[in-house]
Image: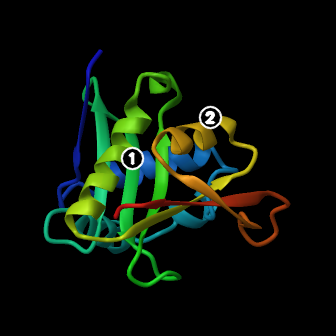
Amino acid sequence: MSVEVRRILAGEWQELRDVRLRALLDAPDAYGSTHEQESGDPDDSWRDWAASGAEGGQGFTAIAVGDTRWVGLAVGAPHHAFPGEVGLFAMWVDPAWRGRGVGRRLVDGVIAWAAIERFPTIRLLVTETNGPALRLYERCGFVDTGERVPLREGSDLAAVSMIRSLA
């Protein structure tokens, strides 16, 4: 089974919503947001998110399509907490597609976009108990900054801050 990894199109907001909500259900301890929070977002929010990651937008949303279904997602966008840097957000691969290099291809897509846009650094947070994701990011050249932050308000889980230089 082959997978196509590409940039989202601005009009693909419904597919984006569907894959994001699947990700939040599949891995509720991997994100700073929850399915309950995002499932009620208005259509305009999803339209804006898709447009911002498409050609001409501020960021880059990579999607993986396998067997005509979206099976992965990764978002690169200017990092609000670290001006001038990129954040890697919303990374997810459908469990049936894990272990096939899809995650690596999604991350590589975001890294390539960030390099073309001349960002010097890319950052991410990953739940400290998510060993497979930590190993993926290490293989992609990210290093642990030593900083730990709460996954989200009210959570006992911590997220590991990782960084990769693009210089």
* Residue visible at 34% across and 45% down in the picture: 108
Dot 2 or dot 1: first in sequence order is: 1
Compared with 73, 83 (above or below) is: below
The amino acid marked with disc number 1 is Val
* Residue visible at 61% across and 64% down in the picture: 33
Residue 42 image label: none
Compared with 55, 97 (above or below) is: above
Which quarter of the figure is the N terminus placed in? top left
- For mark 1, give the secondary structure: helix
Q: Quadrant of residue 76?
A: bottom left
Q: Nearer the viewer, residue 104 or 157?
A: 104
Q: Position of residue 51 (x, y in %)?
A: 23, 68
* Residue visible at 32% across and 73% down in the picture: 44
Q: Is residue 70 left or right of residue 162?
A: left
Q: Are marks 2 and 1 in contact (CB under 8 Å)?
A: no
Q: Position of residue 39 (x, y in %)?
A: 52, 60
The amino acid marked with disc number 2 is Pro
Q: Quadrant of residue 12?
A: bottom left
Residue 107 image label: 1
